[in-house]
Image: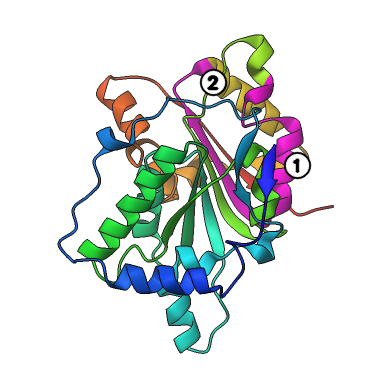
Amino acid sequence: MCVQGSHMFTQGSRQGSETFEAFLCVPQDVKMPKKQLYRARAHSNPLNDQFFDVPLSPKHVNWAEIYPEAYAAAAAAGQPPPLVRFADVGCGFGGLTVKLAETFPEKLVVGMELRDKVTEYVKARVIALRLQSPGSYHNAGVVRTNAMKCLPNYFAKGQLEKLFFLFADPHFKAANHRRRIIQTTLLAEYAFIMAPGGILYTITDVEELGIWMKEKLDVHPLFEAVPEEEVERDPAAALLLQGTEEGQKVARNGGKTWRAVYRRIQDT
């Protein structure tokens, strides 16, 4: 299960302030982190118990700690705190999260990763990018969490505009299909946190999983397939392959992918 606690998630906490101050004092010649120092298993079982803090509710998430510049800018302008609008579930080493932050600089993008060492890598990567390019990447962040269990703890109803599931673990054995990130029951949860008109993106290099995800989405009453011509014009869809490390590997090897892009429709 997820161990819940609010001590490190309260908005405006002293910890968030100290993190921001520490961030400002990091030397500007910082180098990018090295992946070999953050080795981890390729996949984790999302149904196992994990023991890490999870916010009690979306209002308990200390997003200011993750996006200090964006929150400081909003406060200075007398504007309400910005909301995370894009979520990259199973973000891995953060390739898509970073590319989305570059492509949509006005949107807060969060990568969500279950593996602790990989999450730490993405944190270090984002900090390094911010220091190397002042004023940029302030909208990129990452949290360690189990998306199959805890997404409603992070996002309010209708909050997300884009939700990404790229190169998810296929869990080939029939007994393990319940571990797959696209499930009928989970789609209802995803629909809850997505705004009407929001877009859900999936891509995989495993045909059987691609068919599975499309079938689940096709029959769900809260999603409809986005026409292919619209997908081709979508700058976010263009990042599904080349915006991720896994996608780049598939492309280098001449592999085939199965993409499915769906729109969250209005409740009836």
Residue 8 found in image quarter = bottom right
Q: Residue at x 39, y 46 (%)?
A: 120
Of residues 23 and 176, the one nearer the viewer is: 23
Res 24 label: none
Q: Is residue 254 visible?
A: yes
Left or right? Give the position of 247 relative to 72.
left
Residue under label 1: 188
Check disc 2 and give the amino acid type: Pro
Residue stretch rendered in magenta on the structure: 178-207
Residue 234 lies, in percent from the top left, at 45, 50
Residue highlighted by disc 2: 170
Q: Is residue 185 magenta?
A: yes
Where is residue 24 drawn, in percent x and y? 30, 73
Residue depicted at x 67% and y 41%: 2
Identify the secondary structure beneath mark 2.
loop
> Does residue 197 belong to the magenta stretch?
yes
Query: Is residue 25 toward the left or the right of residue 86 in the image?
Result: left
Q: Are marks 1 and 2 in contact (CB under 8 Å)?
A: no
* Mark 1 neighbour density, 10 Å: few (under 14) some (14–19) many (20 or more): some
**What amino acid is found at the position of numbered circle 1 in the picture?**
Ala
